Image (cartoon, helix red, strand yellow):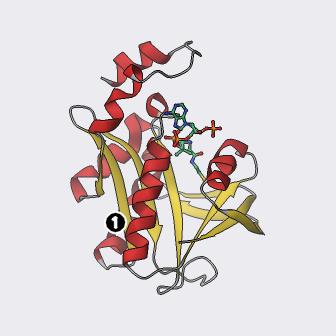
Amino acid sequence: MINRLKRLFSGNMEPITTAQTAWLARVQIRKMVEEDLPSLEWDGEYTHFRRVYQDAFDRYRRGLTVLWVAELPGTGVIGQVFIQLICDRPELADGANRAYLYSFRVRPEFRNAGLGTRIMQVVFDDLRQRGFRNLTLNVAKDNPRARKLYERNHFHIVAHEAGRWTFQDEKGGWQTVEEPAWRMERRL
Ligand SMILES: CC(C)(COP(=O)(O)OP(=O)(O)OC[C@H]1O[C@@H](n2cnc3c(N)ncnc32)[C@H](O)[C@@H]1OP(=O)(O)O)[C@@H](O)C(=O)NCCC(=O)NCCS
């Protein structure tokens, strides 16, 4: 299915039609289960995050994080977003009022059809039910399209973030990411 869609979309810059996005109605946005972990690696593109994903799942089990996936029946997981309910930086997530959205991505073949927006709506509703009042995220300064999407969804910039973090890759080697970002926030 993914390859078929790749063929459909490759080099095709025409506006997306209803027929092309009919798959959207079949997408299920649900909480992640352990069996989903390998599918987050996207055929090798995100293998370096294997331990990061496993750590996030361990935090999810402990009730500190909520992990969402978007699944297209017959195709598999095509999108994800992680929500920290609490972390060591209360300005990002404080466990009561403010939560932090990260690791938000939709597989390229399925972008620009409204799925990302739908995933965010599910996240907003879930957090409201949990009593949270604010949602934060960091968006890389070199990702203006994502920033625009967040602005349309009522996030606004509240701070600059150096965006430096380290993680252990799947082989145990330490990697450093440096991605200057805007911290954005919205009321829920
Ligand atoms: C950011 C991301 C998750 C958004 O997912 P998405 O499914 O493409 O999101 P949406 O389709 O809801 O919105 C994206 C765009 O499609 C447009 N769109 C929404 N519904 C549409 C529709 N039915 N037809 C055509 N366009 C549509 C939106 O207006 C938006 O337009 P933009 O190009 O001006 O931003 C996705 O682009 C992605 O994975 N990007 C790479 C990773 C990334 O940057 N993540 C964010 C890190 S902070």
Q: Position of residue 33 (x, y in %)?
A: 24, 58
Q: Position of residue 104 (x, y in %)?
A: 50, 52
Q: Which of the pair 22/3 is nearer the observer?
A: 22
Q: Which of the pair 106/167 is nearer the observer?
A: 106
At a point 37% along the width and 20% down the height, the residue shown is 19
Going by the image, does 99 lie left or right of 47? right
Q: In this orientation, does residue 69 appear?
A: yes
Where residue 125 sits, quadrant-wise, is bottom left
Label 1: which residue? 57
Q: Which of the pair 157/187 is nearer the observer?
A: 187
At a point 49% along the width and 32% down the height, the residue shown is 108
For label 1, the SS is helix
Going by the image, does 96 lie left or right of 54? right
Q: Position of residue 45 (x, y in %)?
A: 47, 38
At a point 43% along the width and 14% down the height, the residue shown is 8
At a point 57% along the width and 15% down the height, the residue shown is 14
Going by the image, does 80 lie left or right of 143? left
Q: Position of residue 51 (x, y in %)?
A: 41, 59
Q: In this orientation, does residue 171 appear?
A: no
Q: Which of the pair 97/160 is nearer the observer?
A: 97
Q: Quadrant of ligand 1?
A: top right
Q: Is residue 186 above or below residue 141?
A: below
The answer to whether the beta carbon of the residue marked 1 is less than 8 Å from any atom of ligand 1 is: no
Q: Residues within 10 Å of mark 1 (few under 14, many from 20)?
A: many
Amino acid type, residue under disc 1 in the picture? Phe
Q: Residue furthest right?
A: 160
The quadrant in which the N terminus is found is: top left
Where residue 5 sits, quadrant-wise, is top left
**Count of picture labels:** 1
